[in-house]
Image: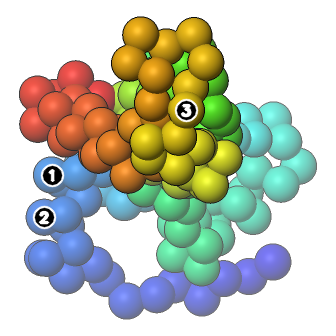
Amino acid sequence: MIFEPVRELDEIAKNILQKRYFQPDENTWEQLAKRNVDHVVGEGSEDYQDMLDMLSNRYFIPNSPGLVNAGTKNGGLIACFVVDFLDTIEEIYKTKFEFAQIARKGGGCGTDLSHLRPENSKVAGSTHGYAGGPIKFFDTICHDMEALTQAGLA
């Protein structure tokens, strides 16, 4: 395939790349593109040069976690995840842990809270006897994510 070169990156784009996307040993888009293609297909692949040309000329650009993490120890390449949120205390805290694990790799999370019992529903075996409801658990996830990202732990 032949990819026509696209216009040069302006100073704003270069600044954003420097602040958010380049690894310490990088300072050009071409270096970032090579790191990504090396990670995804490797130099021996028959598609290597086409993929490198496509990314170098910005005909295709992966999502931000892919651009940042490809070829690093962090390695999270996917931006968005949907996580189950089921109605037991074990599943609720398993989901909260999964949210934290995804956030620390740069991913975003979505979930469906409709499986949780409404607020004040009876809960057998609970000291308090009533469910907190989806909104209270939504609030706890928001606070967890805010604490993780503000503290730089994610």
Quarter of the N terminus within the rendering: bottom right
Reading the image, the residue beneath label 1 is 19
The numbered mark at residue 68 is none
Which residue appears at 52% of the width and 75% of the height? 58
Reading the image, the residue beneath label 2 is 15
In the rendered view, does 52 fall on the left or right side of 138? right
Which residue appears at 59% of the width and 43% of the height? 116
Question: Residue 53's x, y, as percent?
Answer: 63, 67
- CB-based contact (under 8 Å), mark 1 and mark 2: yes
**Which secondary structure lies at badge 1?**
helix
Question: Residue 123's x, y, as percent?
Answer: 56, 25
Vertically, is 36 above or below 100? below
In the rendered view, does 140 fall on the left or right side of 151? right
Reading the image, the residue beneath label 3 is 122
**Disc 3 and disc 1: Cα gap in Å?**
50 Å
Query: Label 3 is placed on what type of residue?
Result: Lys
Are there few (<14), some (14-19), or many (20+) residues within 10 Å of tag 2?
few
